[in-house]
Amino acid sequence: MPQDQKTPEVIKQDGKAVPFDKGKLRQSLKQAHAPDDVVAEIVTEIQKASDGEITTSTIYQLAYKKLKEHRKAYAAQYSLRESLADLGPTGYPFESFVARIFAAKGFDTEVGVIVQGSCIDHEVDVVAINEDRLAFVEAKFHNERSIKSSVQTPLYVRARFDDIAKNNHGRFADGERDVAYWVVTNTKFSDQAKDYGECTGLEMIGWDYPDDQSLEDLITETSLQPVTALTTLNNSHKQELTKQDVVLCKNLRNQEDKLKALGFTDEQVTEVMDEVNHLCHV
Amino acid sequence: MPQDQKTPEVIKQDGKAVPFDKGKLRQSLKQAHAPDDVVAEIVTEIQKASDGEITTSTIYQLAYKKLKEHRKAYAAQYSLRESLADLGPTGYPFESFVARIFAAKGFDTEVGVIVQGSCIDHEVDVVAINEDRLAFVEAKFHNERSIKSSVQTPLYVRARFDDIAKNNHGRFADGERDVAYWVVTNTKFSDQAKDYGECTGLEMIGWDYPDDQSLEDLITETSLQPVTALTTLNNSHKQELTKQDVVLCKNLRNQEDKLKALGFTDEQVTEVMDEVNHLCHV
């Protein structure tokens, strides 16, 4: 291999440099459902664009742009993680989003539930119930996706749920169902957070954790892409829709009126619906 | 009472209005050791300055300025709470500060101690030991003094200390000493935080809590005013000194060289030392 073709350096958000990992990029593009020829084209283009070094954010932007040229829904799927952060600035739409995931798994859900513990009343973000199971869920939202959820999160969640358990689960007491405590976040967990959570019996779901059932996996499996992923909406449209509790892409189905109320023309509505149909096809 | 002398409204930082409370102002000025005639003068002046309404921050600034005119150490004492917030931006000087309070109470102290719990290792801000007692202390620092420490703080502290207790207090295990768990913050606690902390057996110290032994009481009782309270130092002097672990006013005693290294003239050094002698006279 000639000298000038050596592996470029990728500059991460924390300033650290790592060798460019073609396989990792390829995998993230495939997860966006891009076909093989598009994947190959983008990988080559990014290698060319890097002048010895390239930032993760440039890689992301180039890939997003290229995917969008091919099909908007590829770009939408690729930007899933960013689109979760776009559910902010408050944590409420993310709570609602997490509730939809449990609902898709066959649970009845309630959001923002006051549950009486042994010492104090707690606001539990989501309570999910089915015939056999009762789940208390803390939905931990970060606006900044690059923040890692530190060990303080599972620590306070553990104490909160201990206090609830000590009161026999307050108004959810019935002694019949298996009870589980969950922490779901849109970011990654620190290693210490994972160790503590696992050791102390919390169910932990992060963006990329655990390997077999991460938040990304769950979203794709249940076709619950957030409405903020759609490339045909701008930021103020997204905020308006999430405020109206339209947090899922698929919530937009048969909701042409909501788009028209935002000032969309018939043509624009068709464009949005086309992206909806490709992104969250269930 | 004539109409134009009605009680002015005080606008608090959260925008809420409350009637001006002369007694409360008087008390805070007395706590700053201001003599009765100075107190009376300031109360009258602030009533005059209020044009029907006045903000808490204007009251604070007027009182501070007037106290300083009479004696710098009055202003320094009056601004204690602000000066704790000035120990930031990082939490480290506050940890060190909290350790000095335990030291003044006869404990040996260590700061930033790794203690092995049952699930993970924990960094405990301060461990304080004497013959009979062992105290694990979380020092929770906020840059913004008006923030209230929410219930999440005692929750994660409880879980942290539960994990340590489950491992028999790691390297501090000896089974002889009474063990206590403390949370010390420079702000106020929310009511929920107090309820939970008390119920679950944490020792909680906030700026104004508990009534008989608050952080303010402890500082005055032990003459441990932070160096950041001194009015004769500017912000960059304060930051430089706390970086050098000079966190207490009284640490400056016999440290003329440190002030000279910051560029102080002999005259300025005398002025600082005069304030030191009035503020933290032990």
Image (cartoon, coloured by chain):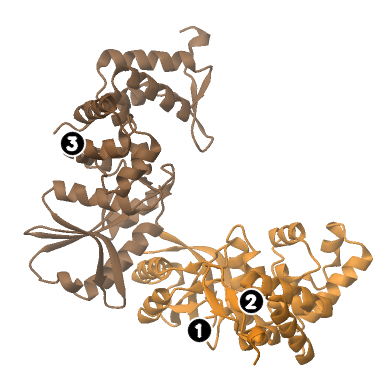
Chain colours: A brown, B orange
Secondary structure of the residue carrying numbered label 1: loop
Residue B237 on image: x %, y %: 77, 59
**Which residue is more in the foreground, A72 or B153?**
A72
Q: Mark 2 sits on what residue?
A: B52
- Is residue B114 depicted above or below B134 in this figure? above
- Is residue B169 depicted above or below B201 in this figure? above
- Is residue B255 depicted above or below B197 in this figure? above
The crowd level at tag 1 (other Cα within 10 Å; few <14, some 14-19, many 20+) is some
Q: Amino acid at mark 2?
A: Gly
Residue in the picture at 38% in, 43% down? A85
* Left or right of A117 in this view: B265: right
* Left or right of A206 in this view: B208: right
Q: Mark 1 sits on what residue?
A: B210
| Quadrant of the rendered image containing residue A217 | top left
Q: Amino acid at mark 1?
A: Pro
Q: Could you tell me which chain the residue with mark 1 belongs to? A: B
Rounded to the nearest whole Å, what is the CA distance between mark 2 and mark 1?
A: 34 Å
Can residue A184 be seen here?
A: no
Q: Mark 3 sits on what residue?
A: A253
Q: Are marks 2 and 1 in contact (CB under 8 Å)?
A: no
* Left or right of B2 in this view: A87: left
Residue in the picture at 69% in, 67% down? B247
Secondary structure of the residue carrying numbered label 2: loop
Quarter of the image where the C terminus of chain B is located: bottom right
**Which residue is more in the foreground, B259 or B163?**
B259
* Left or right of A73 in this view: B217: right
The crowd level at tag 3 (other Cα within 10 Å; few <14, some 14-19, many 20+) is few
**Which residue is more in the foreground, A80 or A156?**
A80
Q: Amino acid at mark 3?
A: Arg
Please name which of the two marks, 3 or 2, marks the residue nearer to the observer.
2
